[in-house]
Image (cartoon, helix red, strand yellow):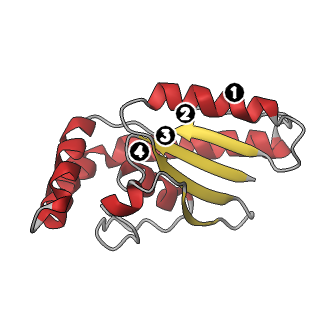
Amino acid sequence: MNILILGTSGVHHTLIAANMLLDRFKGELTTMKGYCDTWLDRSGCPIYVGTDRDGHRVYTLGVGRELKVARKALGSMLELFRDSPHQVVVTEITIQGELWIRMAMLCSHLPWGRRVNELISGRVLRGQLPRIQSQVERLRAQIGLASGEGGNHGALLERVAQ
């Protein structure tokens, strides 16, 4: 199964959620591979984070402010491939303070901008860790259902409630 975690950024809260899902997050933001890497985020491609112990491949994708439009478009596309042998779970992770993170990302191309991005984003994200963790726990429950533990074999699109 492939798990795609959507957010306004693919290298901030979604990356934390992916690492939590993979049981890799130890509380330190700056040691995560790809954290605050806005060049990676701007590529527009899903970012592979890793594979969990059950073989689920976990990706993040930053879609900017149009999160709901992107989720709907991806959901519609996945419906077209309903008979695909590879199951895909698409979810979104949201936090409060995303505007601050977007502003910090704008500084990234300036001298010392990456450090400014890390400082501002870190301050926002540390306060949002409980919210991210609760969304990851709901995602874990959905993955269990989608992989057949609860009989929901046809689920292609899932969403973690905010």
Mark 1 sits on what residue? 76
Mark 4 sits on what residue? 132
Q: Are marks 3 and 4 in contact (CB under 8 Å)?
A: yes
Q: Which amino acid does the dot numbered 2 rest on?
A: Val
Q: CA distance from mark 3 to mark 4?
A: 5 Å
Q: Secondary structure at mark 4?
A: helix
* Count of numbered marks: 4
Q: Which amino acid does the dot numbered 1 rest on?
A: Ser
Q: CA distance from mark 2 to mark 1?
A: 17 Å
Q: Position of residue 130 (x, y in %)?
A: 36, 45
The residue under the point 56% across, 31% down is: 71
* Residue 24 as seen in the image, left or right of residue 36: right
Q: Position of residue 55 (x, y in %)?
A: 74, 64
Is any part of residue 162 visible from this angle? no
Q: CA distance from mark 1 to mark 4?
A: 26 Å
The residue under the point 46% across, 39% down is: 93
**Mark 2 or 3, nearer chain start:** 3
- Which residue is farthest left? 111
Mark 3 sits on what residue? 135
When the figure is inspected, residue 13 is found, relative to residue 27, above or below; the finding is above
Q: Secondary structure at mark 1?
A: helix
Q: CA distance from mark 2 to mark 3?
A: 6 Å
39 or 136: which is nearer to us?
39
